[in-house]
Image: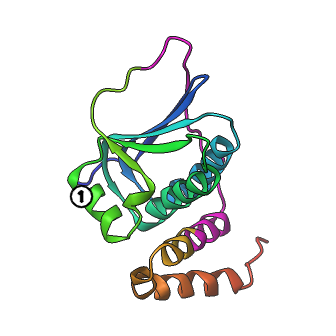
Amino acid sequence: MAAPSAKISVFAGPEFACVRVAGRANFNFGPDLKALLGELGRTEQKRFILDLSDCVLMDSTFLGLLAEFGMKISRDAAGSGRRVELLNPNARLTELLENLGVLGLFKVTTGTLELPPETESRALDSTGPTREDITRTCLQAHQTLMAAHPDNVARFKDVAQFLAENLKKPREKSP
């Protein structure tokens, strides 16, 4: 039986933000996740937690978006104390991040997340991205992975080329 599609929740407090991913995280969430992580990256919060306790699987697009966020926070963090934590990633996710050369962007932690009382929560609602939005986000995520580690170029160059070519195709117009 296939793992359920991902459910993504956001918890934000004065000092931290947490994105909880449950189920199977894939490219369909790409544009919405990219927008959310961009929004969080612009905040003054010091601690970002990606709660992966119930995440069974991630595809390369989702992994690339997490890597992009980790790279941004690492770049911006110089002396600020800002960090991205992966909470309870399973062995498969940890192995994937390690093999892609991006695990070092994150602090891996285990345990239970205690949310302070002033925490606000919401589900990540889809904005209904277009096929072009999803393709563009997939391409950017794969380009991030290729830039993050030289071994990833061989893994993803064909995918990136296919996505780039797909974006160049003229869009069919509805009658």
Q: Is residue 37 above or below residue 47?
A: below
Point 28% across, 56% down: residue: 94
Residue 18 position in % (x across, y down): 49, 34
Is residue 174 visible in the rendered image? The answer is yes
Nearest the viewer among 171 and 60 is: 60
Point 56% across, 13% down: residue: 118
Q: Residue furthest front?
A: 79
In the rendered image, which quarter contains the C terminus? bottom right
The region drawn magenta spans 115-140
Residue 114 counted in the magenta span? no
Q: Kindly identify the amino acid type of the residue bearing the numbered disc 1.
A: Arg
Location of mark 1 (residue): 92
Q: Is residue 138 above or below residue 107?
A: below
Describe the element under mark 1 as helix, strand or loop.
helix
Residue 7 position in % (x across, y down): 43, 40
Nearest the viewer among 105 and 97 is: 105
